[in-house]
Image: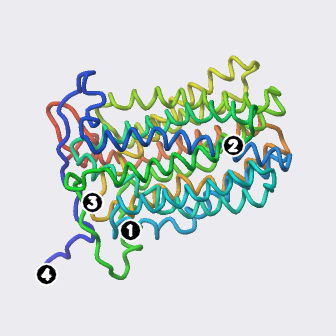
């Protein structure tokens, strides 16, 4: 009797750079013209996205006076990913990533412009923000996984890890610039102008995508339609511990820790009484730490499941400690520290998930990843808003860190008992390929 072939083909080896790259190669993927152009526009786009996020949450707080309402806004923006994220992955695998991004960014630009007009003319109401947040969330179902996979088409597998780190750096650079500008705009002229600027950055992104050299894109062949493709993607995630446990840790952190803007809005109003400018500063400090972490991640020589889980636990622990800080100065320093841990975890998990999945199923795998990353905030936003409103900002901050720290410890114990060390992305000189490894009886087998 012949054995049945495996349901999933093994992950194909990926050539990567040998050894620790010199500092001159820290931004090596930017030597690819398409990726360089995309990254320049992405700095503007991410700054605009962060501006809208901060202005949107603060506007809802102003209009309603309720932290719970801010949590509902977060939930509405991320609920579509939780509900429809897997279908977004199917779309990503079937169609041109470049054209999808042009379409999604165009739609977000229109929605941001509508919200800008409503806010500037003074007729905006909370339900307007709720509706537009939900519609932006619907677009994100396709936009976010497309961005994750499109990086591979821009740079290819050899530069993928570096490009992922740079993409994360750009996102956090936007988080550094956006909240700072939003804080100034909220105090000086109101939230409407922040929405208007985001609409302009969306237009810039569409124009930049149209300027890319399509002949130099390393296109992934579109996946033909077939039955059972959603189940296939889910089975693939469940079959690989390196993907599955990374996604589980992302889910826990997304529900509890990534709802930080909800908690910080309460800190700005009820703990330190620093207003809109302080709220923007708090978010900027987190982003500053994350930007440092993103740059540091480009120097990382390997990514292991064990390290990803440990970083998730460290992030949670730092967030719990932040609840104990007695002054604005010490609180600000902790925000920078947890921003570093945040980004090291996110880039590690992202790299591990992408590089341990085959190209043919990567869109669906990344849609699961993004679904829990963003969709978890749809659950956590209202819950953390309720918790903060009823038990205080410090309690909310403590819970947002303690739960992920405990989860990381439990996952670590489980992996140690099962002796799983699957999927090591090893960039050392002697092993320049992505390999699957598993500990058996204290040894390592490839």
Q: Position of residue 391 (x, y in %)?
A: 84, 41
Q: Which residue is mark 1?
A: 235
Q: Nearer the viewer, mark 1 or mark 2?
A: 2
Say which label, 1 or 2, has the lower sequence index. 2
Closer to the chain start, of discs 3 and 1, is 1
- Give the distance between the C-alpha atoms of the residues marked 2 and 4, in whole angstroms: 65 Å
Of the two numbered discs 4 and 3 on the same chain, state the one appearing first in sequence. Answer: 4
Q: Earlier in the sequence, mark 2 or mark 3?
A: 2
User: Which structural element holds mark 1?
Assistant: helix
Residue hosting label 2? 55
Residue 314 as seen in the image, left or right of residue 441: right
Give the image location of residue 409, x and y in percent: 53, 40
C-alpha gap between disc 2 and disc 3: 37 Å
The residue pinned by badge 4 equals 1
Q: CA distance from mark 1 to mark 4?
A: 26 Å
Q: Quadrant of residue 403?
A: top right
Residue 207 percent location from the top left of the image: 40, 51
Tell me the distance, in whole angstroms, between the alpha carbons under discs 3 and 1: 15 Å
Of the two numbered discs 1 and 4 on the same chain, state the one appearing first in sequence. Answer: 4
**Which structural element holds mark 3?**
helix
Question: Can you tell which of label 1 and label 4 is closer to the viewer?
Answer: 1
What residue is drawn where x is 30% and y is 27%?
A: 26
In the picture of the structure, the residue carrying the numbered disc 3 is 359
Q: Secondary structure at mark 4?
A: loop
Q: At x 69% / y 30%, what residue is drawn?
A: 184
Q: Is residue 202 above or below residue 302?
A: below
Between 174 and 418, the one lying in front of the other is 174
Q: Is residue 333 left or right of residue 36?
A: right
Mark 1 crowdedness (10 Å alpha carbons): few <14, some 14-19, many ≥20: some
Is label 4 in contact with label 3 (beta carbons under 8 Å)? no
Q: Are marks 2 and 4 in contact (CB under 8 Å)?
A: no
Local secondary structure at mark 2: helix
């Amino acid at each position: 009797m012949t054995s049945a072939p495996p349901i999933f083909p093994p992950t194909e080896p990926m050539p990567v750079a040998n050894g620790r790259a010199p500092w001159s190669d820290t931004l090596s993927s930017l030597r690819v013209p398409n990726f360089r152009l995309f990254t320049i526009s992405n700095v503007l786009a991410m700054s605009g996205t962060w501006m809208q996020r901060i202005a949107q949450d603060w506007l809802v707080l102003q209009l309603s006076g309720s932290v719970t309402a801010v949590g509902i806004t977060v939930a509405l923006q991320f609920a579509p990913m939780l509900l429809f994220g897997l279908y977004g992955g199917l779309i990503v695998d079937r169609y041109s990533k470049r054209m999808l991004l042009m379409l999604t960014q165009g739609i977000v630009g229109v929605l941001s412009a509508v919200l800008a007009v409503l806010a500037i003319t003074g007729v905006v109401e909370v339900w307007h923000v709720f509706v537009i947040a939900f519609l932006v969330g619907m677009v994100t179902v396709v936009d976010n996984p497309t961005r994750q996979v499109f990086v591979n088409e821009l740079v290819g597998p050899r530069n993928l890890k570096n490009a992922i780190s740079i993409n994360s750096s750009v996102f956090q650079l936007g988080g550094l610039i956006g909240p700072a500008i939003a804080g100034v705009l909220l105090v000086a002229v109101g939230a409407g102008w922040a929405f208007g600027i985001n609409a302009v950055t969306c237009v810039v992104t569409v124009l930049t995508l149209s300027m890319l050299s399509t002949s130099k894109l390393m296109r992934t062949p579109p996946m033909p339609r077939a039955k059972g493709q959603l189940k296939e993607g889910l089975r693939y995630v469940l079959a690989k511990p390196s993907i599955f446990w990374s996604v589980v840790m992302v889910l826990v952190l997304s529900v509890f820790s990534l709802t930080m803007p909800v908690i910080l809005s309460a800190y700005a109003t009820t703990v330190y009484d620093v207003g809109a400018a302080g709220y923007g500063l708090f978010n900027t400090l987190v982003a500053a730490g994350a930007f440092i972490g993103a740059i540091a991640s480009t120097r990382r020589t390997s990514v292991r499941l064990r390290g990803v889980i440990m970083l998730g636990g460290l992030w949670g622990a730092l967030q719990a400690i932040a609840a104990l800080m007695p002054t604005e100065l010490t609180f600000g320093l902790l925000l920078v520290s947890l921003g570093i841990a945040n980004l090291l975890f996110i880039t590690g998990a992202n790299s591990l998930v992408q590089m341990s999945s085959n190209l043919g199923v990567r869109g669906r795998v990344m849609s699961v990843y993004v679904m829990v990353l963003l969709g978890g905030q749809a659950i956590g936003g209202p819950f953390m808003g309720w918790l903060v409103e009823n038990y205080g900002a410090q309690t909310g901050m403590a819970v947002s860190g303690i739960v992920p720290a405990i989860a990381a410890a439990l996952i670590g114990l489980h992996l140690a008992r099962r002796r799983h060390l699957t999927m090591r992305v090893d960039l050392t000189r002697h092993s320049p390929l992505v390999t699957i490894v598993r500990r058996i009886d204290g040894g390592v087998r490839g």
